[in-house]
Amino acid sequence: MVFDVTEVDHPTLLGRSPIFGTPVEMIIREGIATVVVADWYGATEDGVPFHGSIVRGLDARDPSNIKLLGEAKLGGWVKDTRIVGDVLYAVSEDFGWSYAGAEGSSSSGSVTDGVSGIGVNQSKIIVSSVSFAGGSIQAKDLKSYAGVRRSLLC
């Protein structure tokens, strides 16, 4: 949401761009907002359900007409970020969870028995880099590191 706070006691909502999940970080440069959200549900470009984190670029220079500039989906739950120049580095944890009734492999690669909802997988830490130069959001690279093996009942 973008507010005019010229009159502090009477802020005015100028515009909004909905996004659902857990907010982690927002960087604003020259009216371009780069937003990092964890626990985001959506779909990949080919329609496959996706649960993870997302980096979204929004042009808020005209707050009444906020435009989506692009997004990068990141695996796992973003725990921390750092900015170096025009690159955002994110550290995520993929817990390897799966959910009851989901057969086969989830987007995190966990294996379920399709009946009890028990998921067995190895959690992993993911370090991702996303460029936001010129308002263009582009996933650049990622590296995964094995975590602790888990067995979960969801």
Image (cartoon, rainbow, N blue to C red):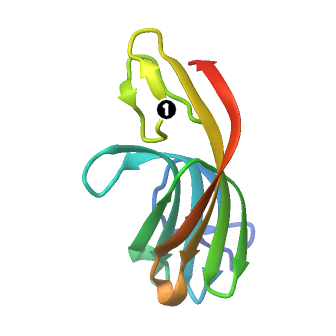
The residue sitting at 46% across, 38% down in the picture is: 109
- Which of 16/57 is in front? 57
Few, some or many residues within 10 Å of mark 1 (<14, 14–19, 20+)? many
Q: Dividing the image into 4 quarters, which one contains the N terminus?
A: bottom right
Q: Classify 119 as above or below 127.
A: above
Q: Position of residue 4 (x, y in %)?
A: 61, 75
Specify the farthest residue to the left.
46
Q: Which residue is mark 1?
A: 110
Q: Quadrant of residue 35?
A: bottom right
Q: Residue at x 57, y 35 (%)?
A: 96
Q: Quadrant of residue 36?
A: bottom right
Whether residue 103 is situated above or below residue 69 in the rendered picture: above
Tag 1, which secondary structure? loop
Give the x, y percent position of residue 71: 44, 67
Quadrant in the picture for residue 106: top left
Position of 91 with respect to 58 (left or right) is: right
Numbered label tally? 1
Q: Nearer the viewer, residue 63 or 131?
A: 131
Q: Residue 61: where, in percent of width, then height?
A: 49, 85
Q: Inspect the image, locate mark 1, and give the three-letter code of the amino acid beneath it.
A: Ser
Q: Which quadrant would the C terminus be assigned to in this image?
A: top right
In this rendered view, identify the residue nearer to me: 43 or 65.
43
Residue 76 placement, left or right of 25: left
Q: Position of residue 82 (x, y in %)?
A: 73, 71
